[in-house]
Amino acid sequence: MLFHPDQLSLGIVLPAQARTHADIQFPTQLATAVHADKLGFDALWVRDVPLNSESYPDPIGHADPWVLLGALAAATSQIHLATGAIVLPLRHPLHIAKAALSVAALSKGRFVLGLGSGDRPSEYEIFGRDVENRKTLFQSRWERLAAALRPDQAVTDEQDNVREEFSIRPALQQAAIPMVAVGSSAQSLEWIARHAAGWMTYYRPLPVQTDRLALWHNAQLKITTEFRGFGQSMVLELLDRPDAIYEEINLGARSGRRALIDMLSAMREAGIHHVAFNLISDKRSPAEVMGEIAADVMPALR
């Protein structure tokens, strides 16, 4: 599992390429994935962008997440593969279960299923869904999906009746596929703490994120004594000047590695268990940045 008490794991968000109006570069992403695996990163995060539009902040034409995950599972051996996030209200839960079980089997238990609600009303409209119903739709589909991913793999219908004449294969080959809530998905933190193995959210300056962590811990205390992870995505422009200061930018930071180490250490102390880097740079390749993080940042944290 990605989340461990008192530890901070690090991941990479794909696609890792220049943020231009271009389709995903499959050879580049597979090479990045293999490199991240060898360097010891903990996770590769794949996004679910059903439809591109000018309103979407990332101009890259994303691949279907399940197709990309299959290629990543075949190309890597140790690193976790995670979705950040499958848009649950726009995909049927039994289709998601089939795909999740397939990726889990192909990756030999390295798959983490991150689920979100999406937030574009026009996208809901084109799929025939009412964005105003996303809270209840997310909950009902989560429950059907969770049932299908249990060891007994219960296939239920719209009325929550178990349909024993159906099963989903391949069979579950691990104790469980971790289901992680990505974003709030219009849910309360208590609901997330009750149903999800962890919560991934977007980057906030640490004092602000610390307040969110306090709310998250309070929600957990009301629901369970079991550990629940907390992670965040983070846009990162890692400068080639090790002593450069840590500077906040939109959804992340621009920094040299020494200040980055200090901030990541503070995040760990605050109770953040995973950070997924969305690498951006006009001057440095993802391979170069990942190499510096693996050589200098990871040892300082661990």
Image (tube, rainbow, N blue to C red):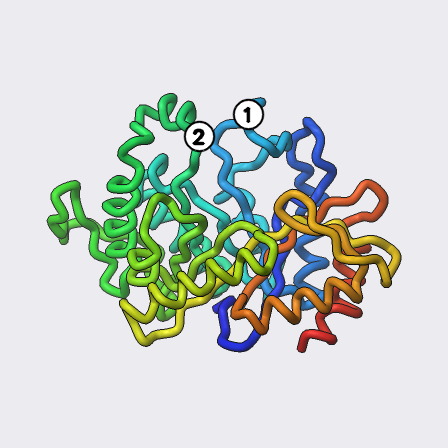
The answer to whether residue 30 of the structure is visible from this angle is no
- Residue found at x 59% / y 71%: 268
- Residue found at x 34% / y 74%: 226
Query: 27 and 204: which one is in front?
Result: 204
Residue on which disc 1 sits: 55
Residue 243 in picture, x, y percent from top left: 86, 62
Classify 70 as above or below 150.
above
* Residue 178 horizontal side relative to residue 252, left or right: left
Query: 79 and 260: which one is in front?
Result: 260
Residue 92 in picture, x, y percent from top left: 31, 39
- Report helix, strand or loop for mark 2: loop
Mark 2: amino acid:
Arg
Residue on which disc 2 sits: 120
Residue 219 in picture, x, y percent from top left: 33, 64
* Residue 302 horizontal side relative to residue 222, left or right: right
- Report helix, strand or loop for mark 1: loop
Mark 1: amino acid:
Ser
Say whether marks 2 and 1 touch (CB < 8 Å).
Answer: yes
Please, which residue is most extreme toward the right here?
Answer: 241
* Residue 51 horizontal side relative to residue 280, left or right: left
Q: For residue 6, which quarter of the picture?
A: bottom right
Classify 147 as above or below 62.
below
